[in-house]
Image (tube, rainbow, N blue to C red):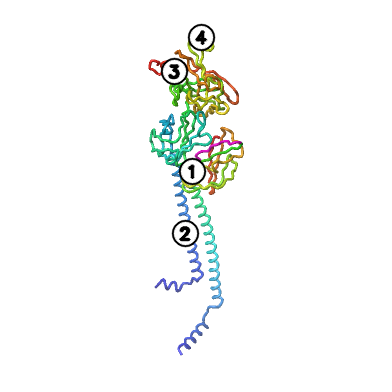
Amino acid sequence: MSIVKWAMSRLERNRRSRKAISTIMANLTMLIIVVFLSSLLFVWAVTSFGAYQGGAGFFFSSRSLANQERLSVENVFFYQSGPSYFAKIYVRNVGSIPVTVASVYVNSSLYNIAQQTINVTQVVLMVGSNGLQLTGAYGQGSVQKMTLATLRGTTFITTWVA
Amino acid sequence: MRIYRRLARSKKGMSTIFGGLFFIILILMGFNLMLWSFIQYDAYNNVVNSMTQRDTQAAGENLVPTNPGAVDFDIPAQSFNITVNNLGVAVSIARIYIINVSPTSSNQCTSSPCIVDPLPASVNFRNGNVQEGEINHKIKVTGILVNDGSGYKVILASTRGRLFSFYYPWPVSAPNNGQGVFQTNIGPLTIFFDFKSFNFTQGSQTTSQGAWVSPTSTAMVFWIKITNSATDSTVKLRVFSSLLFQPYDAGGLGAATPFYIVSPNTVNPNNIQAYDDVNNPYTLPAADPNGPSPSTIVKFGARTEGASTTQSFPQQEKTWLVFIGFYYVYKGQFQGQTIPFVAMRTCAAFPAASCY
């Protein structure tokens, strides 16, 4: 009995309400628009911040690693064996991390070599026991510029007298 | 209660609340990103500072080898000491490279640098850690000798990647103070002579001695240290070079006693070898713009030109004027020059005190 009475009074109140359907729809529409735009903004922000973090993180970590690379070219010995010319390059890793030498330049000419990893404090003779075979004769007493490039993009330039 | 009522009566819609929440989340995300950037940048700076400090320490190394570079030669033990002064921070030697730049009595270290590593390598060095400010620190090298008459370049490589080098024998500096060194300028070259190295060997001696007074009737090999000061070319000595000893009482032609140049491999009259200026010549390296090249010991002891027969002074004691006839190849040109060298005596009772 009481439930019927409550329903009747509720119907009567709603009938007298001044709010129109359009107002409710407007509110709902506004809510949907805000949620949608906010979601878009959120997704954009997450993507942008993520991209920034990825780029900056890679930059800082790669630069940080590259900055710890230190190579010392301790000696370069030029010699002739038969018709061929060689350079024995002794390189020591005096940095904090292992270094991989990817290429060698002699007077700006690239020599493609097998990549050679040098551990910390280790010294190696580059390119095997005979050293690096040069493409041409070196001038006795001339200045030769040796450049070592690592996989991380660090270059070490030294000059030697042949 | 009041706040609750205000919220209950608030006319702000859900959209405002959602918008506000998203805005706060965005602000927090930005703040987090900024914090992350600071942390990353701080870590990067730490690495940069650490490596800068390392570079600064490497730049602070200042190891100065002292004249004559290598000392305390021990032939049976095959060892010698390198004397250095440390004018910088503490240095630790990681490796020593020895290169023969003027092969004279030996071809060691010519086809490849001789490498000296810390113990327990077979050719090794010890005492490679040099304290800051230490003077006359001796680094003992074992397994190789460099006092065979060749000119060597010795490079000390530190653990921080610095290189310190010197030449052995120690290059002769331009004479100006009468300390036993003089120079002769004849022709295109200036050749420095070291008075202290006008020496000879007899019998089977391996260490030379002063030749200012020499024995009579004894086969000898003279050792003379010379240096090329020309910067534009090496000097290759030819087989025609000789020491010519002319006695004060010379009675004419034939009185002089020549000692012709012999092979760099010759040490004493017992192992005398003919000089071959094609396959095993004396080649004096060109001088560096900063000073003369390392000196080279040239040996004379043959009776005839290009032969391996020994030569000796007559039995009669005499006083001799010594001339050097140098024939050499300079800048591809064959040239010769005569240098009045020294005066010396021969003594039958050598090495008695009465000879001096």
Task: Give yes or no for contact between labels 2 and 1 (Cβ–Cβ under 8 Å).
Answer: no
Location of the C terminus of chain B by quadrant is top left
* Disc 4 to disc 3, C-alpha distance: 22 Å
Task: Return the mark for residue B251.
Answer: 4
Task: Estimate the x, y position of residue B136 in percent, counting from the top left.
Answer: 39, 33
Marked residue chain, label 1: A
Residue identifier under label 2:
B32
Residue B101 position (above or below residue A34): above
Check chain identity for marks 4 and 1: say if they share one. no
Q: Is residue B82 visible?
A: no
For marks 4 and 1, give the one nearer the viewer: 4
Marked residue chain, label 4: B
Task: Estimate the x, y position of residue A124 in percent, counting from the top left.
Answer: 50, 43
What are the residue bounds of the magenta stretch? A71-82
Choose between B68 and B30: the one closer to the eye: B68
Residue type at mark 4 is Gly
Instruction: Locate residue B329: give its quadrant.
Output: top right
Residue type at mark 1 is Val
Q: N-terminal of the two: label 2 or label 3?
A: 2
- Is residue A75 rendered magenta in the image? yes
Task: Estimate the x, y position of residue B24 in percent, counting from the top left.
Answer: 48, 64
